[in-house]
Image (spheres, grey):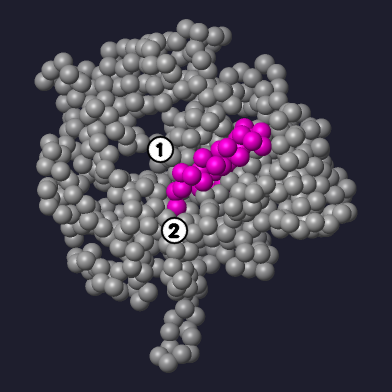
Amino acid sequence: MLYPQDSETRQVISLDGIWNFKADKNDEGMDSKWYEKPLRDAILMPVPSSYNDITQDMEIRDLVGDVWYERSCFIPEAAKDRRLVLRVGSASHYARVWINGRKVTEHKGGFLPFEAVINEYVNYAEENWVTISVNNVLDWSSLPPGYVDTFTINSDPPKELKVQQYYHDFYNYGGIHRPVKIYTTPFSYISDIDVNTDIDGVNGFIRYKVSAEGECAKIRVKLLDESGAAVAGADSAEGLLTITGAHFWEPGNAYLYTLVAELYTPAGPVAVDRYRLPVGIRTVKATGKSLLINGRETYLKGLCKHEDFFIRGKGLDNAVNIKDFNLLKWIGANSFRTSHYPYSEEMMNLADRYGIMVIDETPAVGLNAWDLNHPVFIPEKINKDTQSHHMDVIRDLYQRDKNHPCVIMWSAANEAATNEPGAAAYFEPLIREFRQLDPSRPVTMVFYDCANAVESNVTDMVDIICVNEYNGWYLNYGLFELARQELSQGLQRVYDKYKKPVIMSEFGADTINGLHQNPPVMFTEEFQTEFIKTYVELLDTFDFIIGEHIWCFADFQTKQEVRRVVGNRKGIFTRERTPKAAAFFLKERWNNKKEAVKNI
Ligand code: BDP
């Protein structure tokens, strides 16, 4: 799936801005066909943004159900001979789209884009109305999963209170979270591009395939270097480009070539469609104890992130994203995980450009009730429907992100109850699918602690084992020596059993910015630093550990519960991106620790 872009043959019209909005508090919009007429009593809502924190209305913040968005737009007459595609970057979690009152498409899943050809729905040179309903309900077939509890409040008249329940630890923000665009292509157009890169000594290779729809007489590709000079090219839809003395894409040194693909029809010598794809030449490989990037043993230094900020919630914010990359650079990180769902395409584009490696994760989080007496991999809960949606997500995620050099591995899930008997049958086809789609990248999964990784029925299926640990925080509170000893034994057991590289994929402590005490106690900045220091000093003693990702980058919003003080406070940065004391410790450590350890 190609990211919409302007070119000589394509145009992108942004529908971002202020939309009309109505929360469907009485669940009547669908039956009353709100898509047929302009919304009544609508309020204003920014797109992209979560709607939850925009108003002062708690009922809107906590709504469980549909909200409706609507705006007008014009399609110029000049676009009449073009294919028109409406594309929504993401809407959480179920979206239905109408244009001028006619249903165009619907889409399940809150973290991936969807699009539809809209030529037959639009008026040219006349106002068009786009209506999108977005439902935020999580059920057992969605990712993340959840369920809704319903209570009756004995008011007059009595009212029904719906409460969304879920096991994952981030706020269930809803709305249109990523850009809405209409883009044009010619009717004969480039529909997809696949690239796979390899290296040999100083030379780079790009195996490419350009797919097209409509009439196609010839496909031509040209590879430009960063100065714009052509360094390779071919007159075929697929093939191998050789770049002698290539610049490789490396962490911290992100060289991007541009593959210009052109489509010619029998009509003439002028390209009817042109698409420019950034390409980084690099290889990724997992071996017994190592992660190899371009054949070099590489250590991941970084943090897990969230898409989360004040007011806009999970709405795309380029200013925050660029700030975050500057903070990653400042602290000396070379990687992050898209915990716990696919991030925006805009974010992935930036990671390519900043040379930051990404573990790309599906939204499979919260597949765990944390209680073996209440298993979740059972027919009434995480079942065939969930699995089939998970499969769709894996295919769509791969299609969206396959060409990003920043993506160095796929993560199938976070902290699922993989020790339950039903988990293996659930995950086996999913992990197999990732492998079949993409033999060029390792597949991982995140286990909730060393014991889970050792006991789980799934661990052996992955190439790299990601382990989260909170020993010293959620257990053995503040007992650093004991935590270190147990963690040391646990990690050794994981490696001894599977003989695969291990990433310490989460460890952290809630820390309230400005709280101090020495010797350290929980929640103070001193404690967070000491906790992290204890872990990383231990990690340095193992040769099978290929990376450390702190939980987490910044404080973030969660649902309300007694463990959380206005959200999860394990950030190394506050929610407004102020460094806590541990940030300075990590900056010192990571800036002095080389990511490329040795050539293999
Ligand atoms: C881990 C989860 C993460 C949580 C974190 C925590 O993977 O989503 O936010 O714990 O409790 O288990 O802070």
Q: How many numbered marks, from 0 up?
A: 2
The structure residue drawn at horizontal position 42% and vertical position 55%, both measured from the top left corner, is 49
- Above or below, 309 relative to 204: below
Q: Amino acid at mark 1?
A: Arg
Asked where in the image residue 71 lies, by quadrant, the reply is bottom left
The structure residue drawn at horizontal position 47% and vertical position 56%, both measured from the top left corner, is 312
Q: Return the x and y of residue 330 as percentages of the image width and height.
A: 64, 36
Q: Return the x and y of residue 385 as percentages of the image width and height.
A: 43, 55
- Is residue 336 within the magenta segment? yes
* Quadrant in which the N terminus appears: top left
- Residue 50, labelled with which disc? 2
Q: Is mark 1 within 8 Å of ligand 1?
A: no
The single residue placed furthest to the bottom in the displayed view is: 156
- Is residue 241 within the magenta segment? no
Asked which secondary structure carries label 1, the reply is: helix
Q: Return the x and y of residue 269 as percentages of the image width and height.
A: 16, 15
Q: Which residues are magenta?
A: 315-341
Of the two numbered discs 2 and 1 on the same chain, state the one appearing first in sequence: 2
Asked where in the image residue 586 lies, by quadrant, the reply is top right
According to the picture, the residue beneath numbered tag 1 turns out to be 400
Task: Choose between 543 and 419: the one closer to the eye.
Answer: 543
Mark 2 or mark 1, whichever is nearer to me: 2
